[in-house]
Amino acid sequence: MTRSANLGFPRIGLNRELKKALEFYWKGESDATALHATAAQLRARHWSLQREARIEVIPSNDFSLYDHVLDTSVLVGAIPPRFADIADPDTRYFAMARGTDAAPAMEMTKWFDTNYHFIVPELYRGQRFALNAGKPLDHFREARALGLVTRPVILGPVSFLSLAKAKDDGLDPLDLLDALLPVYAELLAQLRAEGADWVQIDEPVLVLDLSGKQQAALEKAYAALGKAGPDILLTTYFGDLRDNTELAARLPVAGLHIDLVRAPDQLDAVLAALPADKTLSVGVVDGRNIWRTDLDAAFGLVSRVWDHIGPDRLEIAPSCSLLHSPVDLQAETALDDELKSWLAFARQKLDEVSALAIAQKRGRGAARAAFEASAAAIATHRASPRIHRPEVKARAAQAITLDRNSSFASRREKQRARFNLPAYPTTTIGSFPQTKDVRQARAAFKKGQLDQAGYDAFLEQQTESAIRIQEELGLDVLVHGEFERNDMVEYFGEQLDGFAFTRNGWVQSYGSRCVKPPVIYGDVSRPAPMTVRWSAFAASLTDRHMKGMLTGPVTILQWSFVRVDQPRAETCRQIGLAIRDEVLDLEQAGIGIIQIDEPALREGLPLRRADWDAYLRWAVDCFRLSASGVADDTQIHTHMCYAEFNDIMPAIAAMDADVISIETSRSDMELLEAFRDFNYPNEIGPGVWDIHAPRVPDQADMEALLHKAGQGIAPGQLWVNPDCGLKTRGWPEVKASLQNLVAAAKALRLAAAG
């Protein structure tokens, strides 16, 4: 009979209990026993929530203390040699994620096209794998003790190897498949012995353009694993199978999950290819966005599957793990009733899955209330006047030049004459530590315990202090520190029309890092300047150059929950125009260096190459729209986070930013190779300090990285900066690290001069 199922639940807890427990543990304010107790409480609570929602197939091993890909590295014994001597498992695990003074952290990058970051597995020639099955087995047993037989979740072997990084030249991680498969087979056998009847194996690479080697690896892997243990649900998400449909359908597993939110058009092809004995799990509730499901439309899709394969081989599920959704809408007491009626968080998505399953099994009348509420919400959303603003749409339809007045070569000469910066100019990416005092003042202001004048005075004091510190350290281009900002996207969204905000809509970005994405529900415009007051105030306090800090249109789009009733490109253009207005106001206020961060540009790239050109065209155009109105001697910077740049270098060059800064320290400057190979013409700041790791890099480390950067990048192109913003770091390590950074830049200047 048709079953309701879930693929994964948010880990962090309704009140970010996991974040708090992790940070207490890292600070030494609690021990491993307390950390694991909190984790166990969260797992039990989340299993209970799913049972209460009448979900019939509940996952286990979807919980992680930091990252599920890192968990898989530990599971299969892929421990990099620099961490092998750390005996305590917890200490070693977090050292791999965060680094130590002696061992740099493992690289981190984006999970497909989401804002979730995973820890990249490191593999070596002759790699030996060994099973460490404690976590999946323990979590299965925990759930069983609560009366639940769960479906364990495992990242599949081919996706694991495809996401991994070979640390030896000439090694293809897929060459290690034969060594890895026995470990997976042993795990499946142990899970079957524990009583698991199904296991969920995620192979999200199936929605990518696969090489012949990857296709062969999938065939080999599931020929070995298909009968090695419990029945396997092979899970795909974030896109459609396309040319991999026949491959996915014929693999010898018991079931297949497909994402019908991102790719509803794949259904007919999947149904045609699906063997008669295989279960099909249909993801019809959006696991990545917060809009309420149109249950009538979803029921139509599910009914088509029911009619084709019958009730016994059908599962109804979210499109992907609910990891990417906030926990519970009921915690949002400040949203207006109309807007709230349009939304569904993880807990509500479970109810939607359950309602669809009940309707299929017992008729729509059995879930009448859910269907009527859904239809009413869809109708009010469609008709609401707060969504569509004709004047915003009219402005977005106007033709506005995307080109700067002059070429980069001409602009560079004018900017050098204006700013007179030394070789290897030093700067930071924007934010400075958001200390306990800063967070408490913001909270007091929001609660009405601190008035506007008092809050402004506090922020002015923090800003001036940060400027004096930068001056003392000897930085060349200063920033105001962003103490007024809660988040690089939320802060802007709060000042733009068309955005709404939650109080508790947190999702995990990586480890303990949580973000609270704004909700873009309507047409976007800027009613008033957003940053000019603080940038201009900071500039008035110093005779050094002050950099204005903005978040770019693509990143605001990507890091928000975006409306789905119009193309993303149209929403992005509206945001681009709003940022353009801010850029021009900053320039008018005398700010000559303006950074427009686009860390999410690569993240938004479609998973299939055939779709890249269309996306890159509008994404780059929106950035250029935001930046193109300034004079030649105004210097435009941008910043990008961990990403592979090789395949999109023409688009990055087309952005035509005067300076781009990128995160490169974890990769030991390897990510800079794309810029060398492309002969990137503009200026570039490769990060020399990994701010995600709790360590202070010494001057020699930074100099070594800069020397590597200078191999193929002209000295006149190079800036010196950290990898990213410093809001999560403490002042002692910030001061020490920036002191070393400035010293490294000065050492290179001396060497170049001598």
Image (cartoon, rainbow, N blue to C red):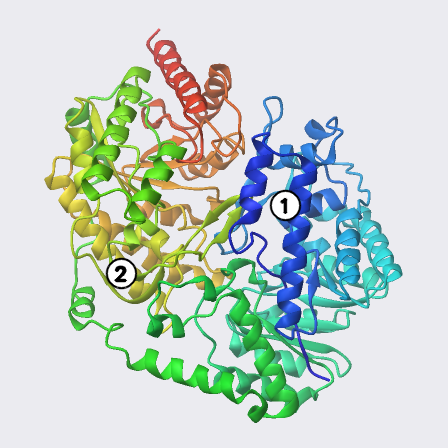
The answer to whether any part of residue 51 appears in the image is yes
Amino acid type at image mark 2: Arg
Q: Quadrant of residue 594?
A: top left
Q: Residue furthest top?
A: 754
Amino acid type at image mark 1: Leu
Q: Residue furthest left?
A: 588
- Disc 2 residue crowd, few under 14, some 14–19, many 20+, Cα 10 Å: many
- Residue ID for mark 1: 65
Residue under the image location 19 percent in, 45 percent down: 583
Measured as percent of width and height from the top left, residue 602 is found at 43, 50
Q: Are marks 2 and 1 in contact (CB under 8 Å)?
A: no
Measured as percent of width and height from the top left, residue 503 is found at 40, 56
Of 636 and 51, the residue lying toward us: 51
What SS does tag 1 mark? loop
Measured as percent of width and height from the top left, residue 353 is found at 58, 76
Labels 2 and 1: the sequence-earlier one:
1
Number of numbered discs visible in the structure rendering: 2
Res. 573 mark: 2
Q: Is residue 621 left or right of residue 288?
A: left
**Which numbered mark, 2 or 1, is in the foreground of this view?**
1
Measured as percent of width and height from the top left, residue 442 is found at 32, 42
Quadrant assignment for the C terminus: top left
Quadrant assignment for the N terminus: bottom right
Vertical side of 329 occupied by 27: above or below: above
Q: Residue furthest right?
A: 193
Residue under the image location 17 percent in, 73 percent down: 390
Vertical side of 521 occupied by 633: above or below: above
Q: CA distance from mark 2 to mark 1?
A: 38 Å
